[in-house]
Image (tube, rainbow, N blue to C red):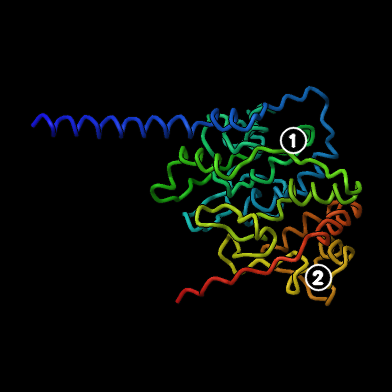
């Protein structure tokens, strides 16, 4: 009897210790301390033109504009993403203080962009590509925040996510971040010129190209060795192509070809892109020719990586 009671106490203590460990390790503050990330606090007047540029590079309107209406600046959200973990809905990021982000401070916005954390301390799902946005400079985040402040408010209520257990427990994403969110901003490569570094920044930071053009592991994180090699569309609508220098990627394309596709949507073979790439082009077309060419130069520098096998079609 005493032995059974002792075993029960030991198991209880083990369970309590595990729960406490989970609570501490999954806290947003734990991730920030582990990565040495500081809160953005930019007192200067934002550069609104640069903020608009980053808004377009980031494709904010593609996910957060209200579906079914023509005003791309109505950021009431609502687009659904059918992921392997459940259905996610893009939230309202308009300037409404109750339904959107109108009450957010710059620090709140920066934490969301770099850490995937809400002002209330809740973790965001990485379908919001903060794994890429973390590369953005503090000044660019402040400029984007300033530009968003100029856009209209929408009272549309954000739709709740439809995530099954255990994926509906967002606290657990704190452990995911410890494994897959490094907290490192973009660092220019001194061995490369300014054009290449600009392209690398736009592609890996605000442009978040790898988020769609890379396969993911069972935890939903990009597989580093296959970055940009193509993968299943995150919305479950086919396969996103390889954009490395592989034979079935962009090997035969020039940097100018890539820049032209980002401007007009036309490939070197005079075909046009569709699907989820079409709204990307609409946003990228608003960038300067210099920005698009820099992205083309960077993408042409990527080593060839073979496309992973496509998943079997569901019967």
Q: Examine the rendered structure and indicate whether residue 74 appears above or below residue 153.
A: below
| Label number found at residue 290 | none
State which mark lies toward you, 2 or 1: 2
Which quadrant would the N terminus be assigned to in this image?
top left
Identify the residue at horizontal 67%, vertical 35% (top origin): 95
Task: Tell me residue 89's x, y (percent).
Answer: 54, 50
The residue lying toward the viewer, choosing from 169 and 4, is: 4
Label 2 environment density (alpha carbons within 10 Å; few <14, some 14–19, many ≥20): some
Task: Tell me residue 97's x, y (percent).
Answer: 61, 31
Residue tagged by mark 2? 251
Quarter of the rendering containing residue 302: bottom right
| Label number found at residue 141 | 1
Task: Tell me residue 74's x, y (percent).
Answer: 68, 46
- State the residue lying farthest toward the front: 3
Q: Examine the rendered structure and indicate whether residue 39 appears above or below residue 160.
A: above
Q: What is the secondary structure assignment of the residue under circle 2?
A: loop
Task: Please state the total of marks drawn on the protein image.
Answer: 2
**In this rendering, position of residue 225 left or right of residue 263:** left
The residue lying toward the viewer, choosing from 100 and 28, is: 28
Disc 2 vs disc 1: Cβ atoms closer than 8 Å?
no
Q: What is the secondary structure assignment of the residue under circle 1?
A: helix
CA distance for labels 2 and 1: 33 Å
């Amino acid at each position: 009897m005493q032995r059974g009671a002792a075993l029960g106490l030991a198991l209880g203590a083990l369970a309590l210790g595990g729960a406490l460990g989970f609570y501490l390790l999954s806290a947003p503050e734990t991730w920030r301390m582990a990565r040495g990330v500081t809160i953005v606090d930019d007192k200067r007047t934002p550069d609104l033109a640069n903020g608009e540029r980053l808004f377009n590079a980031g494709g904010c309107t593609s996910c957060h504009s209200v579906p079914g209406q023509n005003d791309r600046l109505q950021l009431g959200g609502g687009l659904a993403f059918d992921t392997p973990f459940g259905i996610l809905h893009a939230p309202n990021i308009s300037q409404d203080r109750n339904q959107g982000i109108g009450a957010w401070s710059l620090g709140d916005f920066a934490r969301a962009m770099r850490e995937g954390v809400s002002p209330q301390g809740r973790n965001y799902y990485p379908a919001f590509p903060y794994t890429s946005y973390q590369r953005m400079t503090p000044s660019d985040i402040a400029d984007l925040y300033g530009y968003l402040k100029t856009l209209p408010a929408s009272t549309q209520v954000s739709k709740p996510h439809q995530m099954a257990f255990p994926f509906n427990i967002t606290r657990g994403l704190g452990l995911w971040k410890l494994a897959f969110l490094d907290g490192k901003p973009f660092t220019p490569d001194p061995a490369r010129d300014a054009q290449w570094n600009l392209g690398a920044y736009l592609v890996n930071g605000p442009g978040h190209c790898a988020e769609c053009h890379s396969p993911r592991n069972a935890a939903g994180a990009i597989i580093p060795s296959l970055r940009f090699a193509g993968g299943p569309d995150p919305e479950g609508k086919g396969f996103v192509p390889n954009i490395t220098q592989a034979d079935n990627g962009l090997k035969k394309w020039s940097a100018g070809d890539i820049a032209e596709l980002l401007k007009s949507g036309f490939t070197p073979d005079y075909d046009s892109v569709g699907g989820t790439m079409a709204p990307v082009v609409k946003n990228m077309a608003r960038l300067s020719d210099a920005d698009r060419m820099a992205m083309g130069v960077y993408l042409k520098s990527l080593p060839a990586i073979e496309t992973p096998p496509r998943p079997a079609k569901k019967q």
